[in-house]
Every structure is written in C-alpha cells, then in structure tokens.
Amino acid sequence: MTDSTGSYAANWYPDPLGRHEYRYHDGTRWTEHVASHGRQSVDPAMGTGAVPTVDRPTEKVTRDVGRAGVAAGAVGGGTLFTEPVLVVNQKAKVIEVSNEYAVYDQHGKQIGAVRQVGQSMVKKLLRVVADVDQYFTHKLQVVDMSGTPQLQLTRPAKLLKSRLIVQDGGGRDIGDIQQQNAIGKIRFGLMSAGQQVGLIAAENWRAWNFAITDEGVIFFIGQGMWTIEAAGPQQVSVPHSELAAILA
C-alpha cells in the first residue's frame, strides 16, 4: 500500500472518505475516480471520512465489559489492534439503511468504528420497503478515529450460508470467514490461503455468544491418564482436520 516514506503507490484503495468501495490514488493524491460493485464513477475527493459514533455512556460500556466476564486491569495500546478488549455497539436507527457501529476500548473510550460503504440509492430503498438484505452483497470498513480504513469486510449475497471476505486497509486479502452449518449451533471456519486456521462456534442455538479458537482442539490430560511416566498434567493441541482420523 505504501512505501518506506509513507506515500501511496498509484493504485485503487478502499475509499478513505467512506462514500464508495474504492478510490484511486495516483501516487500523489486521492483522485475523483471511484468504484463500487465493479462500476466506476466520479466523485471529488473533498471532505473527510465520516466516523460513526454511538451515544452510549462510558459507564454502560464498562458495564458491558463486566457482564462479559472480562477481568479489568489489562493495559492496551489505544488502537484497534493493540487493545485487549473491544466493545462494539450498533448505532440505533428507526430505519436501518446503512449499518454503522462504534468501537470502544474496555474503559469506554471510542477508538474506531465500522461503516457500510458502496450502497446505491436503489439498495437503500429496497432495505426500507422489503426484507431482502441477505440477497445483497454488503461491504464494510473498519476505521480508526481519523476515518482511515484498517480492515475491509465483504459479505457476498447469500441464500443459506454466509461468507465474509477479510482484507487489510489497502484492500489486500487476509482470509475469509465461512459459515459451516445452518442447523444447530452455528459454526464459522476462519480460513487463510484455503486452510482453516480457527473456528467461531456458537455456545447455544440462539447464537448470542461465540467462542473463538485457533485450529487446534486443546485436550487437557491429567497425570497418568495416558502415559504413566508423565511428570504432570499435559496439554495437547490437535488440528480439527485430524480429529476424525483420531476418533475413528
């Protein structure tokens, strides 16, 4: 995305103004050339990127952290990628035509946001008059407090199972999140380069709470349970892909 001096190489990047999916940087400045859903258009690069905010008192955010069972006291770096705890609150609206969220640290300070980009007026109108959201492709930007994209998330149109494509702030692929089942406790595979590297698993059928793990299933083995010569309890990580063969 940038060279050692911090300047942009000429290319298309997630629109820093948040009005479109992509905007072209000519190596010197952001241009008026933009694109959404593969269609190019022109929109002058004027103004600053909007950062959604949510009117949620600090004490309520810290209460949310406590309800989640998170112990207080962990020290973070004050950014989206250095804080140990992130609290995401959706912006409440009478009519939802554009998804917006504020991201707080554990102390209730907003450090970023999530904003939906690239929606046409037709799509916004259809979201008002019909329940057809799942049949649309949605693109979101995770931004810092300056409005600079840190991640880009794309959820393609779906019929049954969802998929989320994850890219960095420069539009480069990181991986994707794939829904694995539609019945029972919902699971999502965390994928990178075609390999599953982790799992998001709902803790109950309502899918309100999720556990996020890496690819290995951790088995805790008490002393003497498997090997009598073991000096103490052991911990073994087994990849999900190997479980079937081991348990067969």
Image (spheres, rainbow, N blue to C red):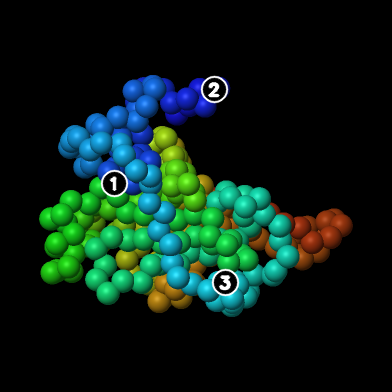
Could you tell whether 40 is left or right of 116 in the image? left
* Mark 3 closeness class: few <14, some 14–19, many ≥20 residues within 10 Å: some
Observer able to see residue 171: yes
Q: CA separation, marks 1 and 3? A: 29 Å
Work out whether 245 lies above or below 30.
below
Q: Quadrant of residue 93?
A: bottom left
Which class describes the residues within 10 Å of circle 1: few (<14), some (14-19), or many (20+)? many
Picture coordinates of residue 97, whole percent (x, y):
24, 63
What amino acid is found at the position of numbered circle 3 in the picture?
Answer: Thr
Q: Nearer the viewer, residue 66 or 61?
A: 61
> Residue 129's x, y, as percent?
13, 69
For the point 62% across and 75% down, which residue is it? 66
| Quadrant that contains the N terminus | top left
Give the residue pinned by disc 3. Answer: 58
Q: Which residue is mark 2?
A: 5
Q: Is residue 232 above or below residue 167?
A: below
Identify the secondary structure beneath mark 1: loop
Residue lying at 76% horizontally and 58% vertically, measured from the top left: 234
Three-letter amino acid code of the residue under disc 1: Arg
Dot 2: element: loop
Question: In this image, 50 relative to 78: left or right?
Answer: left
x%, y% of residue 159?
A: 21, 59
Question: Would you say the residues marked 1 and 3 are in contact, meaning their CB atoms lie under 8 Å apart?
Answer: no
Determine the residue positioned at 42% across, 35% down. Answer: 170
Q: Give the number of the disc on residue 19.
A: 1
**In which image quadrant can residue 105 be found?**
bottom right
Q: CA distance from mark 3 to mark 2?
A: 38 Å
Marks 2/1: CA distance?
27 Å
Q: Locate residue 137 relative to residue 190 in the image: left or right.
A: left
* Helix, strand or loop under label 3: helix
Q: Residues within 10 Å of mark 2 (few under 14, many from 20)?
A: few
